[in-house]
Image (cartoon, grey):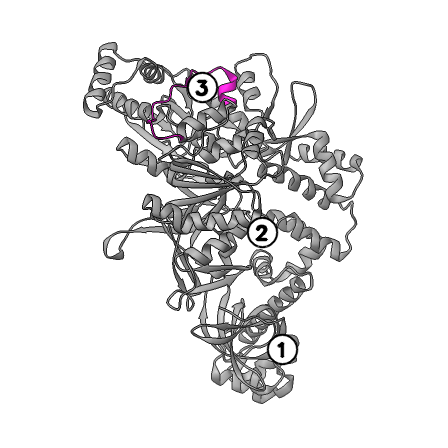
Amino acid sequence: MSGMESDQNLKGVITDIIFENADSGFKICELETKDDIIIVKGTLPFVQIGETLSLEGMWVTHDVYGEQFSVSSFVKEVPRDPEDLEVFLASGLIEGVGNATARLIVNAFGTDTYDTILNHPEELARLKGITHNKAMKISAAFQEHFQMSDIVMFFNKYGAGTKLAVKAYQKYGGNAVQIIEQNPYVMIDDIPEVGFKTADKIGRTMGLPFDFDSRIYAGILHCLKQGTQYGHVYIPFEMLENECAELLQVERSKIASRIDELDILSKVKIQTDDRGSRIVYLSYMYHCEKYVAERLYGLRSVNCTFEEENFQMSIRQFAGFTGYELDKDQVNAVRTAGENGVTVITGGPGTGKTTIIRALVHFMSSCNKKCLLAAPTGRAAKRMTESCGIQAKTIHRLLEFSGDDTNDDAGLTFKRDENNPVEADVIIIDELSMVDTLLMYHLLKALPDQIQLILVGDKDQLPSVGPGNVLRDIISSTLFPTVTLSVIYRQNNESLITWNAHQINMGKMPEFNRKKGDFFMINSTNPQNCAGAVVELCTKRLPEAYGIDPIRDIQVLIPAKKGTSGAINMNILLQEKLNPAERYKKEILMNDTIYREGDRIMQIKNNYQLEWEIVGRYNIPIDKGLGVFNGDMGRIREINDTAATLTVEFDDGRRVNYPFSGLEELELSYAITIHKSQGSEYPAVILPLLGGPRMLFNRNLLYTGITRARNCVTILGSSETVRNMIDNVSENRRYTALEQRIREVCDLPEICCLREET
């Protein structure tokens, strides 16, 4: 698509509906204006043939279909002309009214038809073939239809858009306007797509007072939910007061009392930390954290026994068929996991975590124990499968995700739970640093009472995107057997990646630019030059040097999104070079982003309702399910203009059809933030590091970025920037109290509940 003009207005009658998506309300229609017949497209819910619309939008030029009008908002006009009224009534919208009945009504009442149907339906019953009951039904259907128009006009007035109007109508029916005018903040709980900012925009425009009770309640809950987006499980009471006072522009005293009221209403949970200071949870977050502590402690006491002779035989057999003999520390790790109900195995890259998992699978099998493997992401699960030789699943698939009624993490539902636990004797979870408190809660709910739980991960990686810091808190509690791996096994004389990762973790400078090496530094301090160098590396230098695919095998990892060398701009530059526009490639412009067939993309939010399928030979579906998650990556395989859909095939083989209206959940992913790369591994990684906020440019971030690479790392920046990042061990505060909750369960002395993490 190309060529856009400023917003314009059109008015005309819908004469044909070429395509419609019932779920999204997206339609492609013919519109007859006084001068011409044109094609219009957009979200047009409840629009029928024969209706007169006033449209606002812009002209777009499609490469195949030519000039079209893209609708941003619309208002239904009441058909006044008898001919238009007849077409409208005969459209099928009004049940029981066909061509003959429509003609009969319009011939009888002419220009008074609209008023008669709406306000004097009994008059219809005087016509031959129309009973009193049928007249009432016609009037009711007519009235209901135009109620939708009122709702759309209401939301357009407040800049909320047609999509939200549809959701409100679906929830509240014809009373939507009345309900929202009384209290717009009810939408936050009732309509998943509505957040505090949308509801508050309507409320403030309506003139509701700043200290409106529902507004303050909604603001408090909003701040707590925002906290979870930054990894917090709770927020200190005084901090919450300050954040809400700034957001709502009301006195702190009014906020404090409302927090207490929300506690009474069980919307929040007020607790006291070890310093005697009050802290505030969303109620479900407190429940999840407390349950995780209690369940882990309960599993710790699982009785685990094995015969020493069988153990030694298993270790020898493993060495025989793998050609790899475990050393003393690795044998101890396998033994520890075999002896305990809950075991943690942690270590950096190359320290043998995968080898130990393989040995554990073999040993547990020799004990006739059923072992399951899982990881938080599709990429991590795929790597686990390839290295261990048995099927690993994502945690969501293991638990058989079944849906989410609220489109909120709190509303997750799984088929596997305490009433239907997974069937296994042992479960091994890899990349545990990526598992947040909510997912850990659901995992533990689904485990049988006598299962052995083995948790594997790198405690020095960035913590989970979601709230909590499960791996570190479990280790810090010191209440679960923990094997810390430090010896580097995955290393050869030429490779510097693993070695440098450990050097950085110890506060030492990495080694660069060794001849025939795999760890390089390109001095670059100018953002424009840096961006150009990244493009050249991706398109020419690395593919030529390593024989790799520039789209599939090279990943640019960047600390921040904005700036000349930020992820947003780099994606534009890389898309232009790696997947340029071609006549045979379809593309669509949405939300200032061009999505083109062949593009590398990433899902940027959890969507628990998206349907996916995996297809086999002859394009026959072999598996299907629900849910696409933040960080899932794939390629755009098809753009279907007629169906208004975009098809993505993710790296694990799942295919998802996105309506054009849902593309805000996707981003180009030629370049992504380091945070988004957790749990993934790429043949080649490029790290532009030109400096930035101290809280972001730290050792933890650098370590995580480097450890994503398998064969090659290239850093663009300066030695000074790298040195400063290594020296910067200050970390962002992440409020989590799992360590404290575990100690409470064990009746041990309380410790500081504040973890310092990035």
Q: Are marks 2 and 1 in contact (CB under 8 Å)?
A: no
Give the class, few, some or many, for how many residues have Cα within 10 Å of label 3's Cα (few <14, many ≥20): some
What distance separates the C-alpha of mark 2 from that of mark 3?
A: 38 Å
Q: What residue did someone put label 1 on? A: 78
Nearer to the camera, 240 or 671 = 671
Q: What residue did someone put label 3 on? A: 298
- The percent position of residue 143, horizontal first and vertical second, equals 61, 71
Characterize the magenta stretch by its predominant secondary structure: loop
Nearer to the camera, 680 or 419 = 680
The quarter holding residue 158 reads bottom right
Left or right of 50 in this view: 396: left
Q: Are marks 2 and 3 in contact (CB under 8 Å)?
A: no
For numbered disc 3, what is the local secondary structure? helix
Label 3 is placed on what type of residue?
Answer: Gly
Label 2 is placed on what type of residue?
Answer: Ile
Q: Residue at x 32, y 25 (%)?
A: 357
For numbered disc 2, what is the local secondary structure? loop
* Any part of residue 231 in sight: yes
Give yes or no for residue 41 being in the magenta stretch. no
Q: Which residues are magenta?
A: 473-496
Q: Residue at x 63, y 77 (%)?
A: 78
What distance separates the C-alpha of mark 2 from that of mark 1?
A: 29 Å
Label disc, if present, on residue 191 of the rendered structure: 2
Earlier residue among tags 1 and 3: 1
